Amino acid sequence: MSDCEVMQILTDTFHNDEFPGYESVKLSWKQLSRVINKEAWITALQNQKGVYLITDTSNGKMYVGSAYGDEMILVFAV
């Protein structure tokens, strides 16, 4: 260990550049803010109408919304 050098400390291990499919999207706000500028995510979210659930993890309150406008779900994620 004395011969080792720390080159980089990563903030976390979430690396999801590819869109996993609508049924697999369950992200924290921090995770969403990192992938929302990825081309695959933008394409998927701006081409999908849908119902979404936002949960406030500090108090458990939930908000159910729907997206059906010009930018579909993408407008709510940005």
Image: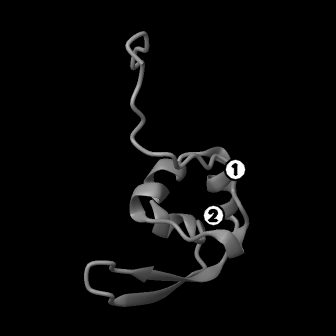
Q: Nearer the viewer, residue 15 or 40?
A: 15
Q: Is residue 42 left or right of residue 58?
A: right
Residue 9 vertical position relative to residue 69 in the rendered view, above or below: above
- Residue 15 percent location from the top left of the image: 58, 46
Report the residue that reaches farthest toward the front: 1
Residue type at tag 1? Glu
Report the residue at 69% width, 50% height from top. 18
Q: Quadrant of residue 44?
A: bottom right
Q: The C terminus lies in which quarter of the figure? A: bottom left
Rendered image coloring scheme: one colour
| Separation (CA) of disc 2 from disc 1 | 12 Å
- Residue 57 percent location from the top left of the image: 33, 78
Q: Is residue 51 left or right of residue 60?
A: right
Residue type at tag 2? Leu
- Tag 1 or tag 2, which sits nearer the N-term? 1
Report the residue that reaches farthest toward the left: 59
Q: Nearer the viewer, residue 66 or 6?
A: 6
Report the residue at 61% width, 69% height from top. 25
Task: Indicate the secondary structure of the residue bearing disc 1.
Answer: loop
Report the residue at 39% width, 31% height from top. 9
Q: What residue does disc 2 label?
A: 45
Q: What residue does disc 1 label?
A: 18
Task: Indicate the secondary structure of the residue bearing disc 2.
Answer: helix
